[in-house]
Image: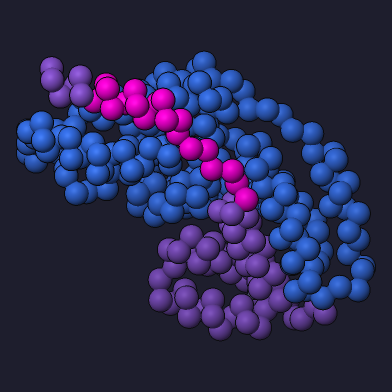
């Protein structure tokens, strides 16, 4: 199951993080696309981080602001424009 | 804030800014306030304070620019100034149970990588909230701003008043901590 070990995994991790954050440049994207396909260690690392990010987006409960708070803010705003 | 660009809005303009640019972010703002205070009343107070400050400084906000980041920055400053000292400590979570759960999935099981990742995904989904809440507030903050709210490094740097490099390294440390907490690291194929 294991392939040859990743040559510079620390560098890979830093690029993988940029990819996950949507902040990678073209060079880093190219590196990612070519390397990750053939590196089991990196593709696993990426899959897990992606899974975590996905879970944060989908499973983390999103609290909605209570209506009474919104109502109160509207009143306070009206007051502030009058002064 | 750039004083040269300061201009005074009419009441009608203010009304539009409030309704179209400030209010649409109320749920994100409230959700973030709740995630850093762990308390609905504190979150409400914090949001109220944030918006009151936004009203007071509305003339220094440039119409049509990034209201969401602007509001998050005010919220973060309000939190640091007044709430941090009195907000409750995050609930400490006992990971023993979680660990036992993850470790029960021994590595020598004949299971393919894709299937294993599917299994990990399922576990992560169940535990992600607990794991995030147990993160130190600075780490929790960058994870929420990036992953939940979709802010860029640059926006986060402005919101948090820290250099982009710090945003990046803090975010990456936060991700590592999350992996550890979710025990996926130990669960992976034994790489270190
Ligand atoms: Zn690699």
User: Compared with residue B143, is residue B52 higher up or lower down, i.e. above or below?
Assistant: above
For image coordinates 15% across by 34% down, the residue present is B14
Provide residue B143's location: percent of width, then percent of height. Answer: 53, 47
User: Compared with residue B56, is residue B109 higher up or lower down, i.e. above or below?
Assistant: below
Q: Is residue B156 left or right of residue B84?
A: left
Looking at the rendered image, the quarter that the C terminus of chain A falls into is top left
Question: Color used for chain A?
Answer: purple
Q: Is residue A31 left or right of residue B185?
A: left
Provide residue B133's location: percent of width, then percent of height. Answer: 63, 37
Does the magenta segment cover residue A62? yes
Does the magenta segment cover residue B74? no
User: Compared with residue B112, is residue B95 higher up or lower down, i.e. above or below?
Assistant: above
The chain displayed blue equals B
Residue A38 visible in the current orientation: yes
For image coordinates 64% across by 61% down, the residue present is A51
Provide residue B96's location: percent of width, then percent of height. Answer: 85, 39
State the scheme by which the image is colored: by chain
User: Compared with residue B102, is residue B78 higher up or lower down, i.e. above or below?
Assistant: above
**Count of all numbered marks drawn on residues in the image:** 0
Q: Is residue A28 left or right of residue B91?
A: left
Residue B80 visible in the current orientation: no
Residue B16: name its quadrant. Answer: top left
Looking at the rendered image, the quarter that the N terminus of chain A falls into is bottom right
For image coordinates 60% across by 46% down, the residue present is A60
Q: Which residues are magenta?
A: A59-77
For image coordinates 56% across by 25% down, the residue present is B39
Q: Is residue A79 left or right of residue B72?
A: left
- Give the prevailing secondary structure in the magenta stretch: helix
Provide residue B17's location: percent of width, then percent of height. Answer: 20, 40
């Amino acid at each position: 199951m294991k392939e040859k070990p990743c040559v510079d995994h620390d560098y890979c991790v830093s690029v993988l993080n940029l990819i996950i954050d949507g902040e990678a440049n073209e060079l880093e994207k190219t590196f990612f696309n070519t390397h990750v396909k053939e590196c089991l260690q990196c593709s696993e690392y990426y899959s897990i981080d992606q899974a975590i990010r996905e879970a944060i987006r989908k499973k983390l409960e999103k609290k909605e602001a209570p209506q009474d708070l919104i109502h109160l803010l509207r009143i306070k705003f009206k007051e502030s424009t009058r002064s | 804030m750039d004083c040269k660009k300061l201009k005074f809005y009419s009441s009608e303009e203010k009304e539009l800014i409030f309704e179209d640019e400030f209010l649409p972010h109320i749920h994100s703002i409230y959700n973030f306030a709740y995630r850093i205070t762990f308390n609905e009343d504190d979150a409400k107070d914090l949001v109220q304070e944030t918006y009151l400050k936004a009203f007071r400084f509305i003339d220094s906000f440039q119409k049509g620019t990034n209201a969401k980041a602007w509001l998050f920055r005010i919220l973060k400053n309000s939190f640091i100034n007044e709430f941090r000292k009195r907000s409750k400590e995050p609930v400490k979570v006992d990971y023993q149970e979680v660990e036992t759960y993850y470790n029960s999935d021994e590595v020598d099981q004949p299971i393919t990588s894709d299937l294993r990742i599917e299994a990990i995904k399922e576990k992560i989904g169940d535990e992600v909230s607990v794991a995030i809440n147990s993160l130190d507030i600075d780490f929790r903050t960058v994870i929420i701003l990036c992953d939940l709210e979709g802010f860029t490094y640059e926006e986060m740097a402005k919101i948090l008043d820290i250099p982009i490099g710090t945003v990046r390294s803090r975010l990456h440390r936060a991700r590592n901590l999350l992996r550890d907490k979710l025990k996926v690291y130990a669960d992976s194929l034994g790489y270190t």
